[in-house]
Amino acid sequence: MRIGYIGLGAMGSALARRLLAGHELRVWDLNPAAMSAFAQLGAMAAACAAEVARDSDIVMLCLPRSADVRQVIFGAGGLANELAAGQLVIDQTSGTPQETATIADELAVRGVAMVDAPVSGNPEVVAAGRGTIMVSGTDAACERALPVLRELAAHVLRCGSRLGDAQAMKLVNNTINAGCRLATLEAAALGRKLGLSLAAITEMLNRGAARNRTTQVMLPALAEGKAASNFALALMLKDLNQSTTLGRELGVPMPLAGLVRGLHQVGVNTLGDRAQLDQVAQLMETMASTKVAAPGGEAVPEALATVEALVAASNIALTWEAVAVARRYGLALDAIASVLAVASGSSAAAKRLLPEFVEGGDATALLQPWMAHLRGAAEEAVRAGAPLLIANAVLALAAAPALNRCQPAAS
């Protein structure tokens, strides 16, 4: 098949490389070096986006923002100059759902179909074919897209028939992932100040109720002095900006996500636009005045129980808040559950919480087993000089009916 791929950044390159062996691949990017690298691998480098459209049956895009997608399609030298009726556009950008739907409507007038198919997983995982792709669009368009998408990822999950549904799900997933990462790191920082070793913290968190993607991937990487991901901090901030904006537009409070967004903004402001996502560990260490991966420490049962409670309760509250946005947006609960079972927002809390997530449900009941430890941790944080921002926010929410905000989408 003739496939065009536009956007050869870290994620786009990882995806496009998987298409080299089985397809006639034409690529385009603003970065000539990126195109040259693909040309050396056998791809054809196009002179402009329009040339990609002219010579491809399917055009795929993975760009930083939906505004970039619009420019590549409708701007000077853009795809629209050569797209013809019957072609398919697959947008893998982590974009804005409403803007994607608008772009799809404009393409439909020309007889061009579109699906959105964003990806969860760091570029290394995606390059190995172990990522998760969320896809939405009409049945006919998705059926055309699925064979190609299944070459790219182990999990390809349908999220809805409306354009933008998959991108909304990606925002929800990334919000949970980002929140659980910071909650885990701040709890680990407190644990270190309480005399725990990182090895003991990691082993305990991965044992049960507090397990999440950060405990499974980032904490072991920190212990080994390795990178856990190759993803820009500014791009995660972009996703959090979009998700919290979506929450406001839908009338769903997102106090925890707002706090997580603010911490990522602090990270970008202090570490710079080129900072990597892994560097949030440095941010949380600086705030707590400790080193999470420093040698030493031991396994103190009472302190370990405190750290477990912090992470488990935060996982529950962050997941509930983001899923409430997804439900208000109109995503089906089974689609949400299928994504959170395998994507980067997965956690032990999600697996327990989602079956109990019913209309009118109350997350505070799920938090009750952890409340005594949360209160104790807040006192320990004061004595140890640790900020404990997210966990304290969870504690405050658990004392009020604020989490009881699950509402179905308007019919």
Image: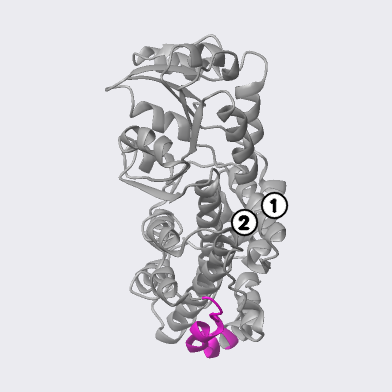
Q: Evaluate whether residue 195 shows in this view.
A: no
User: Dot 1 lies on which element?
Assistant: helix
N-term mark: 1 or 2: 1
Identify residue for label 2: 283
Q: Which quadrant is the C terminus positioned in?
A: bottom right
Indicate yes or no whether the magenta region holds residue 118: no
Q: Of the numbered discs in the image, which one, if any, rests on residue 350?
A: none
Q: Residues within 10 Å of mark 1 (few under 14, many from 20)?
A: many
Q: Evaluate whether residue 346 shows in this view.
A: yes
**Residue 289 is drawn in which quadrant?**
bottom right
Identify residue for label 1: 265
Q: Nearer the viewer, residue 184 or 6?
A: 6
Q: Which quadrant is the N terminus positioned in?
A: top left
Q: Nearer the viewer, residue 255 or 69?
A: 69
Q: Position of residue 81 (x, y in %)?
A: 60, 14
Which amino acid type is shown beneath numbered disc 2? Answer: Leu
Q: Position of residue 45 (x, y in %)?
A: 46, 11
**Residue ID at (67%, 66%):** 252
In the displayed structure, would residue 70 be above or below residue 368? above
In the displayed structure, would residue 105 be above or below residue 171? above
- Name the main secondary structure of what is drawn in magenta: helix
Q: Position of residue 100 (x, y in %)?
A: 60, 39
The residues bearing labels 1 and 2 have C-alpha atoms spaced at a distance of 11 Å
- Foreground mark, 1 or 2, reads 1
| Magenta extent | 359-375
Q: In this view, which residue lies farthest toward the left? A: 22
**Residue 199 is drawn in which quadrant?**
bottom left
Which amino acid type is shown beneath numbered disc 1? Answer: Gln
